[in-house]
Image (cartoon, rainbow, N blue to C red):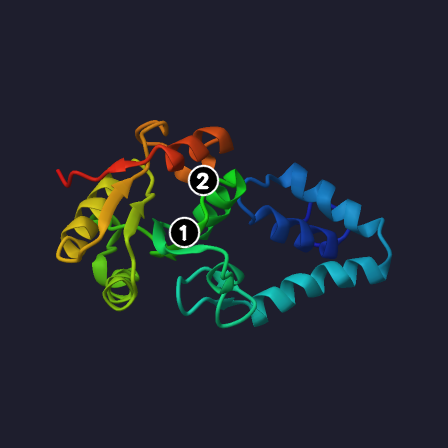
């Protein structure tokens, strides 16, 4: 046995270390998950593993909004029942899921892939901002909702987007500040987030 391995099996140790790499998973939780899988049938464990391999190999990003998708166009963009004249701009895919869970928004999305953060070396060219501008320019969009987290980086990105989108005949609004300053959007409870979407306010740009 490897002297650096706290368990009786190197295989168990390796699997536990892989689980422990996941966010929010400590070593004890990782060990419980691995031991749980060991109690399952080989077929169940293979299905579990194959689900993630298939996800990693076959997942796509919607060519319209950059949300995750099984096809070139995601189910949200392809849904004819949604209001295509309203775009909700979010930082990441987690925010799309959070807003969808509120069941308060029936428009479409645009996922930036992050926010402007000079300290982290992320500038406008690293995000899908130009594609958003092109979307607004070539489609009958009436309203843009800036639904970014109320952090310094989020506010900086909001202001940049406002300047880029101001030349177009489009209403620009932002979510109501039911979300506390400095909070990440994905951690807001669904009721607060839903109310922030419904009670959105015009973006002033200052």
Residue 77 image offset from top left, x and y in percent: 46, 62
Residue 33 image offset from top left, x and y in percent: 72, 44
Q: Which residue is mark 2?
A: 186
Residue 52 image offset from top left, x and y in percent: 64, 62
Residue 102 image offset from top left, x and y in percent: 51, 38
Q: Quadrant of the C terminus?
A: top left
Residue 140 quadrant:
bottom left
Q: Quadrant of the N terminus?
A: bottom right
Q: Secondary structure at mark 1?
A: loop
Number of residues whose C-alpha sits closer than 10 Å to that of mark 2, classed few (under 14), some (14–19) or many (20 or more): some
Front one among 85 and 63: 85
Question: Given contact means CB atoms under 8 Å apart, are the residues at marks 1 and 2 in contact?
Answer: yes
Left or right position of 197 against 8: left
Front one among 84 and 19: 84
Q: Secondary structure at mark 2?
A: helix
What residue sits 56% from the left and 48% below the top?
A: 22
Q: Between disc 1 and disc 2, whose residue precedes? A: 1
Left or right position of 145 against 17: left
Please determine whether, in this image, residue 16 is positioned above or below residue 131: above
Left or right position of 49 against 174: right
Please determine whether, in this image, residue 198 is positioned above or below residue 76: above
Separation (CA) of disc 1 from disc 2: 9 Å
Whether residue 8 is visible, yes or no, is no
What residue sits 78% from the left and 45% below the top?
A: 36
Front one among 141 and 24: 141
**Residue 92: mark:** 1
């Amino acid at each position: 046995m490897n002297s650096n391995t706290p368990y009786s099996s190197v295989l168990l140790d390796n699997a536990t270390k892989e689980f422990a790499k996941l966010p929010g998973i400590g070593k004890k939780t990782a060990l419980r998950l691995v031991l749980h899988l060991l109690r399952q049938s080989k077929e169940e464990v293979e299905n579990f593993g194959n689900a993630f391999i298939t996800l990693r190999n076959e997942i796509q990003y919607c060519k319209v909004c950059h949300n995750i998708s099984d096809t070139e166009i995601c189910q949200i963009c392809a849904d004819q029942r949604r209001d295509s004249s309203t775009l909700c701009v979010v930082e990441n895919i987690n925010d799309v899921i959070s807003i969808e869970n509120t069941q308060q928004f029936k428009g479409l999305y645009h996922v930036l892939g992050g926010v402007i953060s000079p300290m982290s070396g992320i500038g406008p060219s690293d995000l899908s901002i130009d594609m958003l501008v092109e979307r607004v320019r070539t489609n009958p969009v009436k309203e843009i909702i800036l639904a970014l987290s109320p952090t310094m980086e989020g506010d900086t990105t909001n202001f940049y987007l406002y300047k880029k989108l101001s030349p177009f005949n489009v209403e620009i609004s932002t979510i109501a500040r039911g979300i506390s300053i400095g909070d990440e959007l994905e951690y807001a409870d669904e009721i607060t987030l839903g109310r922030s979407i419904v009670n959105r306010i015009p973006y002033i740009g200052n």
